[in-house]
Image (tube, grey):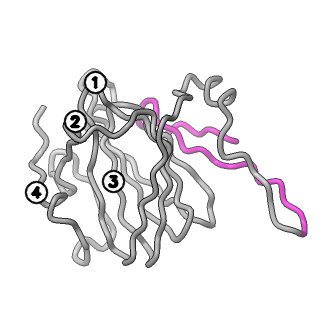
Amino acid sequence: MYFVETPLSGSFVVELELLSDERGFFARSWCEEEFLAFGLASSFVQCNISYNKNKNTLRGMHYQAEPYEETKLVRCTKGSIYDVIIDIRPESLTYKQWFSIELSETNHKMLYIPKGFAHGFKTLSDNTEVFYQMGSAYNEKSSRGIMWNDPVFGVVWPEEDQLIISDKDLSYNRYLE
């Protein structure tokens, strides 16, 4: 695996090292030893799958409040997504900054998201599936969200006029420090 730090402190794009031959390829998508070598959380207690029927489905921006903050390792296993993270750690040098990347079944990239980030994505194709490894179990009482288009952050989303968003995600307020 190759770890490429993003401009946001503590988050990484993880690229798989594909060992290819005439049959296809083999790759490790998880290695505790390699994650620890980069100082990354290496304990995952829950795995989730998000299936999305339609292109232009937007989910986010989600996070969990203390003490249930989540570390995430996200990979798109079918289709493709425009994945976005926002640093909401007030003490961070990259506070209120955002980063995006396309994750897809063909590029095999993953995004490591440390605690203290909001996360969301927009599907770029129909029938998209996203696989998450989670560092904390979901806690409904600590579940939070930020408006996907909050001007405080200025996230640029592709094709913003065609979005499919749940009522819950539409109900989120602007970010308050």
Mark 2 surroundings: few (<14), some (14-19) or many (≥20) residues within 10 A: some
Residue 128 lies, in percent from the top left, at: 47, 70
Q: Which residues are magenta?
A: 1-22
Going from N to C along the chain, the mark reached first, 4 or 1, is: 1
Q: Is residue 33 magenta?
A: no
Q: Give the CA distance from mark 4 to mark 1.
A: 23 Å
Mark 1 surroundings: few (<14), some (14-19) or many (≥20) residues within 10 A: few
Going from N to C along the chain, the mark reached first, 3 or 1, is: 1
> Is 126 rendered above or below residue 138?
below
**Residue at mark 1:** 67
Q: Nearer the viewer, mark 2 or mark 4?
A: 2
Q: Nearer the viewer, mark 3 or mark 4?
A: 4
Q: Check the picture and name the quadrant holding the C terminus.
A: top left
**Residue at mark 4:** 171
**Residue at mark 2:** 142
Contact between labelled residues 1 and 2, with CB atoms less than 8 Å apart:
yes
| Three-letter residue code for mark 4 | Ser
Left or right of 19? Residue 41 is left
Mark 4 surroundings: few (<14), some (14-19) or many (≥20) residues within 10 A: few
Going from N to C along the chain, the mark reached first, 2 or 3, is: 3
Residue 51 lies, in percent from the top left, at: 43, 67
